[in-house]
Amino acid sequence: MKDRLNLMAALSENMLKVNMLLSVFFLPGTLAGCGKNPALRITTPKKIEALSGSCLEIPCIYDTEHTSYNSSRTIYGVWMKGAINFWADPNIVIFNSSGSVNTYSLNIDGNLREKNCTTLFPDVKTSYTDRYFFRIENEPFKASACDDPLDITVKDSPWTPSINIPVGDLKEHQSVTISCSAVTPCPHSPPELTWNLQQDSERQTEKNTDGTFTTKIQETITLSDTHDGYNISCSARYPVNGGSKTAETEVTLSVSYAPKDTSASISPSGLVSAGSWVELSCSSRAKPPASFTWFWNSKHGAINLSVGQVYSFNVTEGEEYYCEATNDLGNQRSVIFLLVKDDPVFGLHIILKILGIMLLCSTVVIFECWFRFSNKPKKEKEDQIYVNTVTETKP
Ligand SMILES: *[C@@H]1O[C@H](CO)[C@@H](O)[C@H](O)[C@H]1NC(C)=O
Ligand SMILES: *[C@@H]1O[C@H](CO)[C@@H](O)[C@H](O)[C@H]1NC(C)=O
Ligand SMILES: *[C@@H]1O[C@H](CO)[C@@H](O)[C@H](O)[C@H]1NC(C)=O
Ligand SMILES: *[C@@H]1O[C@H](CO)[C@@H](O)[C@H](O)[C@H]1NC(C)=O
Ligand SMILES: *[C@@H]1O[C@H](CO)[C@@H](O)[C@H](O)[C@H]1NC(C)=O
Ligand SMILES: *[C@@H]1O[C@H](CO)[C@@H](O)[C@H](O)[C@H]1NC(C)=O
């Protein structure tokens, strides 16, 4: 019993030694620089999404301050997949720029001598979703950027584009630039963007500050009341192996505008009798909704009668009224005549007005005819005189 215990103790002691040995021999080689001050750092987005069947470009810059690094010597760039435990699974190397390994047909597009490790996955698959590490081998310098893992997520469905509208209240007459943009992990075949604003909007693929790309279309429009409630929809069609994948998004515009289509109405309609009760009502299209004020156009100017959409009163005589619809952006008026039955004064008034207008019109027409008629022969005469003068001056 005691022997067995001793044996077990000895075994576990040996195993511990083996483990320690492994750590001593393998850790420095594979994970050189990992610890508080890693010998290799890379700058890439921390997380990057890709679309299956498309390509993925990973913007990447590496840096090292290690004295044994010398860019004049051969540099190999290595990509590893999964958790770094190299000694347990040597197959985690998926790419070695020496050409010895290239599981995913990768290519380092960047120039390693310029510390550019920009890498292209030409055709990503869902199974590529994983954590990746970059490594530089520049004998005797060898280091993995173990503090800068890169998480790649491969999706089957594309990203919905985003419609960008300036923040703040949109108002009519304002000129705004609206854009639709889509993430572009594969700048070699960017998504095609279409929307219902203007079809000829030019597509641009721009580089973001982190080295990734965005494709966008934009349009500057002058807002009007018709844009309020308008649904802008934008779709992004990503080319993928053997076809394309499309995602769409929609945004509803909200535009403030001054009152439009202001209209005053009277109830009961038509002629009303003096002493009866009438209701004047005003309506308008406005955003924010308009408030209404009723005015009476008296001989001494407009008189503010009441605030509110409806104004009811007891008719005495025919008059002119108007309502004014007002919101923050402006106002609009609508005039209404109240015609009263058995209103001799008002009736006469109207008849006189109509007669006056008719008289004025006919006077104008008669004068015009007389003017043309009496002018015509005179003009011909002048022409003749002119011709005569010309012939006279000839030698
Ligand atoms: C880098 O290597 C080249 C050639 O091997 C050598 O000439 C140069 O001095 C080295 N530079 C440094 C900074 O060690
Ligand atoms: C990369 O390739 C070089 C040259 O074949 C080789 O010496 C090196 O060990 C390889 N590195 C890894 C991590 O596979
Ligand atoms: C790195 O290389 C890629 C591919 O050649 C290039 O597009 C990118 O501009 C380079 N990055 C820098 C920072 O030079
Ligand atoms: C805009 O979209 C919303 C929600 O999808 C819908 O209720 C509305 O009717 C649409 N408006 C127009 C003008 O099509
Ligand atoms: C309207 O005014 C007249 C005269 O002041 C009055 O006789 C009549 O009853 C009033 N009508 C109503 C509906 O108030
Ligand atoms: C009309 O009068 C009401 C109060 O009687 C007042 O609150 C309102 O501001 C006036 N409206 C205008 C346009 O003068």
Image (cartoon, rainbow, N blue to C red):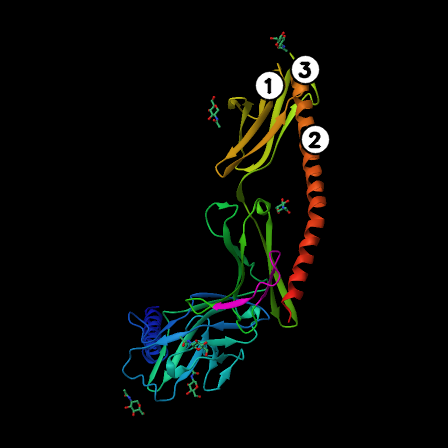
Q: Outermost residue toward the left?
A: 67
Q: Quadrant of ligand 5?
A: top right
Question: Cβ–Cβ below 8 Å for labels 2 and 3?
Answer: no
Foreground disc of the pair 3, 1: 3
Q: Disc 3 or 1, which lies upstream in sequence?
A: 1
Label 3 CA crowd tier, 10 Å (few <14, some 14–19, many 20+): few
Quadrant location of the N terminus?
bottom left
Which residue bears the numbered disc 2? 358
Q: Earlier in the sequence, mark 2 or mark 3?
A: 3
Circle 1: residue type? Ser
Q: Is residue 208 left or right of residue 394?
A: left
Instruction: Bin the neighbour count of mark 1 within 10 Å (Cα to Cα): few under 14, some 14-19, many 20 and up.
Output: few
Front-most of residues 119 and 265: 265
Q: Is mark 3 within 8 Å of ligand 5?
A: no
Q: Is residue 363 above or below residue 352?
A: below
Disc ID at residue 342: none
| x then y, percent, for residue 263 | 62, 32
